[in-house]
Image (tube, coloured by chain):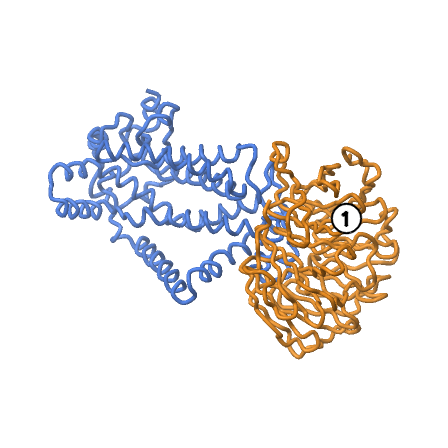
Amino acid sequence: MTRPPASAAPNAAASPGRSYGNIIMFAIIGFVVLSVIVLGLGRAWDTFFIGPLVNALVFLDILMLGNFGLAIILFTLILRFATIPFTIRQLESTRAMQAAQPQMQEIQKKYKDPKRRQEETMKLYKEHGINPVGCALPLIIQMVVFIALYRALVFVVGGSPESLVGLSQRLYDIPMLQNAIPLDQHFLWLNLGQPDPTFILPLMVGVSTYVQQKMSMTPTATPQMQQQQAMMAWLMPMMLFFFMLNLPSGVGVYWVASNLFSLFASYYVYGRRILSWRQLLLPGPAPAANPEPRNKRPEQRSSTQAVEPEPEEPARDETDAAGRTGRVRAAHGKRRGKRKNRR
Amino acid sequence: MEEGTLYASIDVGRMAALDPDDLTVKWVFPPNTDEGDKLDLQGIYASPVVDGDAIYFGAYDDNVYALNAEDGSLRWAFKTDDPVVGSLTLKGATLYVGSTDGILYAIDTAACTNSCPLEAARTFDTGSSIWASPLLLEGILYVAAMNGRLYALNAETLEPVDGFSFEGEAGLLVEPTPANDDTLLTGGIDNKLYALDRATGAQKWSVEGSNWFWGSPLVDGETVYAADLDGNVHALSVSDGNPIWSDAFKTESPIRSAPLLAGETLVVVDRAGNAYGLDPKSGTQQWGPTLLGKVVLSDPSLLDRSTAGDTNSSPSASPTDGSPAPTGEASPTRAAREDTATEVLISAQGGDLCRIDPATGSPVVEPPCVEVPL
């Protein structure tokens, strides 16, 4: 099974799906900005994020027969599936960025004028169909949901009178939802409204975030950037670990479920990309063992593939130029990839 | 207030005995010691019950605590499975506790010395969650549960009373309150306040608010004052539930606390700490809002210095929201006209105590809310 070279990634502007994606993205941003202007930040946040989220969680709790932990996991899956076009787009942009690294390094070397360098970089992004905004949007959505979920959980399973008063202001006047109050806060060993005193969940959040970050790291143009990226790979999980020591466990359940989903999404987009313990601990991005989407049928491939048949060597050359040793030539399949990774 | 001592929860999750004159602390529990530092009550949402030399209260750390009233030392703690947020009810040596684990515990305090094992309590499981304080009336214990049911139990055996049945449309938060000799009030998440027959639980009338009812209704003669969580204060006829005021009085934020009648003024305090004085007959605003600048969930209390020691109830403080709990059987009507009231004491979230003059609404001290020095 072969795939088009990364340099031949379809241009974002040429794809109708991506155009729709852009329209949806800008519509969402426009709606958010407009509601903030009309209602004010606090009220808009409460009306369009916290309120619907609170009611959705209560409704899912009913669907899950009163198991609120499962309701949070179901909510995570629904949200991640709903935003999967953005997620796939982010991963594809990341993949395209990986492929464009050699040219980016060339640009860094070739152009000393920052303005010109910027222009050339943007041109390269366009050629490769890389959308930096598209990369950021799923992360922004994740963070917004994370914050909103934290606030919603305080109301939904906070368990204190203050929380219940807050819930009364946000729960819709629907008997089915009202009958579900108060929700059962217990799930596995956790009290979903309280931090996990055993540290198990904070550890799960930290570890899953670290692995997920390693899986989605991109090659960088300079050693400094690589160093920064490596630092971030540790910093973010550490921060989340410490946050989780004080946040309701329900937020941690969401985060772990979301990270697991991201790992599967990475697998879907990148194909098999196995990390060894050594690769997990060392700085730098994970190797892309088989960039071919696992379930991408031949007929689904980009039409550009026919025009630009994939050369095998350039794929290796590109990775070599980026200074990686673990990359696998696309045409050589999984066995080779595994063997390389084991080294 | 009990024998010249004011018992209140201060700070977060600490019970204190205060001098009512200057609010100085006589003792505090957990104490400021290494041993005390190990205890984290997480919050006290229930008003204490004082019985002679003992003081009882429930805490958010799932425990019921018994302290020596003299020095605040711990006598025993009784563990439930979930936080205790409602007030306790005491009859003789039996302490009735409703826990959010859904179980009503009847603790035999005589069987508890240095510790209080589970065997010291008889239990009744509602299968739901209990947030409201239980009410004891003529040997019958009324327990409102979050499954919408009001249970009438024999206080001795905890067996359900034959012929009594009531189920609301959603969870019940309002502690059962006697309106007259044969009527009980309760309500909750279905936005309704119910008047029920005390013997059978049959519904006499119900009134729908625009949000949940939670604060205890105040009954004064033939009038019920009740506030909902949309900040509407209703005055209703006990007999048929018809409105007495032309319109409900609207405050700026939700009202969790119970209304208080101080002389000729009905005092209500909303969650945002806005205190209002209303004419109880017409619902017109006499003063306010007096801005306390603190979040208030607890019931206001009257602090009458001239009669200090004559009342059995204690004000609750931050982050409490429980109402003063009776130490024995409740009288048919708990509302009392306090013509000699001198100030209203309000405990706010964060541990501050606020004091206002009920006649004018002006703060007794400036600022109106002060932190109790530990």
Provide the letter of the chain coloured orange. Answer: B
Q: Residue furthest top?
A: A343
> Vertical placement of A312 versus B217: above or below?
above
Q: Position of residue B85 (x, y in %)?
A: 68, 49
Local packing at callout 1 (Cα closer than 10 Å; few below 14, some 14-19, many 20+) is: many
Provide the letter of the chain coloured blue. Answer: A
Q: Position of residue A78 (x, y in %)?
A: 49, 49
Residue lying at 42% horizontally and 64% vertically, measured from the top left: A40
Q: Position of residue B224 (x, y in %)?
A: 74, 69
The answer to whether residue B225 is visible is: yes
Amino acid carrying label 1: it is Val
Residue lying at 54% horizontally and 43% vertically, measured from the top left: A248
> Vertical placement of B216 versus A210: above or below?
below
Q: Report the quarter where the C terminus of chain A lies.
A: top left
> Vertical placement of B67 versus B231: above or below?
above
Chain letter, disc 1 residue: B
Q: Report the quarter where the N terminus of chain A lies.
A: top left
Q: Position of residue B308 (x, y in %)?
A: 75, 57
Q: Which secondary structure, mark 1?
A: strand
Kindly identify which residue carries mark 1: B50
The answer to whether residue B169 is visible is: no
Would you identify the image quadrant in which residue B283 lies?
A: bottom right
Q: Is residue A102 left or right of residue A214?
A: left
